[in-house]
């Protein structure tokens, strides 16, 4: 939507195709406090305001899933799941990513209400409280380090018998008195009371023993899933499935750009996603203007 805003303000006509809901993952955040200039808002409020803003500037929006793109030279044909073609001279891919989920009953309903994927975004809500962290790679360790500076206790739950993240991160995290680690355990259930997460059930993979661990929140860092394969013929993917585009958001196909969490990058935050949208839109405008 930021890309749409910048393109519109440069005099271009814009169609925004969205397969689920406008705003993407930010709509799962009940409280956003890291957007510059705004002390607090919900993700839904932000997405709704941005949608209203681009529609007021003339954007056309449609709920439809793009399943492939055909490069026809000066024109790109975006094919949606219903077989309809949308023609454009430039296309910005902002497909985002999905957080890998645990696959447990009730998990989706708890996202933003006890389950979180971002310590920077939601860590303050758990100040002086007990949280569990599912995962054992670098992302999980880095998130847990941040949480350990706020929470009364952080309990690491790793399904493997060892942590896969860098040893330096492990040394920093596990030197802290308020951090506990469990390895070789699987999370088997999310236990709620009046709609709030109260504990998680775990099972030791070696012994089969089960245990309920009381907690106020569960952070999940077991990987991200980009869904970019449909566009690989026109935009190269890296080994992890992300668009292999740099900070300029350019792909190998003239007129096609990649913006946001879907491209290869180190920092995936609301501010960097919006920044990519502006960068990609201005690049597309220069392309359309023949510059």
Image: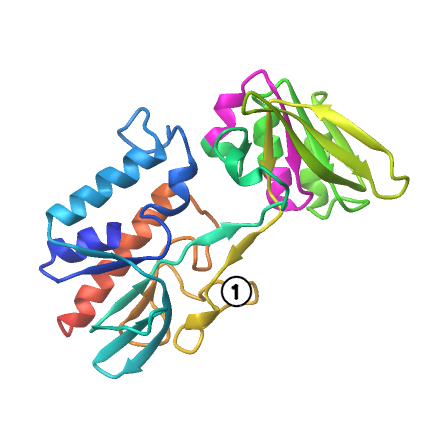
Q: Assess disc 1: are there few (<14), some (14-19) or many (≥20) residues with their C-alpha within 10 Å of its C-alpha.
A: some
92 is higher (above) or lower (below) than 46: below
Side of 8 where 227 appears, left or right: right
Q: Quadrant of the C terminus?
A: bottom left
Q: Which residues are magenta?
A: 122-142
Q: Residue placed at 40% from the left, 62% from the top?
A: 246
**Residue visible at 11% across and 49% down?**
57
Residue sitting nearer the eye, 90 or 142: 90
Q: Position of residue 86 (x, y in %)?
A: 24, 71
Residue 125 on the magenta segment: yes
The quadrant where residue 277 appears: bottom left
Residue 113 seen anywhere in this rendered image of the structure: yes
User: Residue at the location (39% across, 76% down)?
Assistant: 234
Q: Quadrant of residue 13?
A: bottom left
Give the residue number, with chain letter if any, for mark 1.
241
The verdict on residue 124 being magenta is: yes
């Amino acid at each position: 939507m930021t890309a749409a805003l910048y393109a519109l303000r440069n005099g271009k006509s814009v169609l925004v195709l969205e397969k689920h809901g406008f705003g993407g993952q930010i709509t799962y955040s009940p409280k956003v406090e890291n957007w510059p200039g705004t002390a607090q808002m919900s993700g839904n409020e932000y997405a709704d305001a941005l949608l209203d803003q681009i529609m007021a500037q003339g954007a056309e929006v449609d709920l439809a899933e793009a399943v492939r793109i055909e490069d026809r030279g000066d024109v790109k044909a975006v094919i949606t799941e219903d077989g309809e073609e949308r023609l454009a001279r430039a296309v910005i891919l902002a497909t985002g990513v999905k957080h890998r989920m645990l696959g447990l009953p009730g998990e989706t309903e708890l996202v933003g209400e006890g389950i979180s994927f971002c310590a920077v975004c939601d860590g303050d809500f758990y100040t002086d409280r007990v949280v569990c962290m599912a995962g054992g790679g670098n992302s999980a360790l880095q998130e847990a380090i941040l949480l350990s500076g706020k929470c009364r206790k952080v309990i690491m739950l790793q399904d493997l018998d060892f942590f896969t993240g860098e040893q330096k991160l492990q040394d920093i995290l596990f030197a802290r008195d308020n951090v506990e680690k469990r390895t070789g355990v699987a999370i088997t259930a999310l236990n709620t009371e009046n709609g709030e997460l109260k504990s998680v059930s775990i099972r030791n993979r070696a012994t089969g023993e089960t245990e309920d661990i009381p907690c106020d929140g569960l952070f999940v860092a077991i990987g991200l899933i980009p869904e970019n394969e449909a566009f690989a013929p026109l935009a190269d993917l890296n080994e992890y499935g992300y668009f292999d585009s740099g900070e300029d958001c350019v792909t190998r196909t003239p007129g096609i750009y990649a913006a946001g969490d879907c491209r290869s990058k180190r920092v995936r935050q609301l501010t960097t996603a919006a920044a990519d949208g502006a960068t990609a839109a201005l690049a597309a405008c220069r392309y359309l203007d023949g510059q």
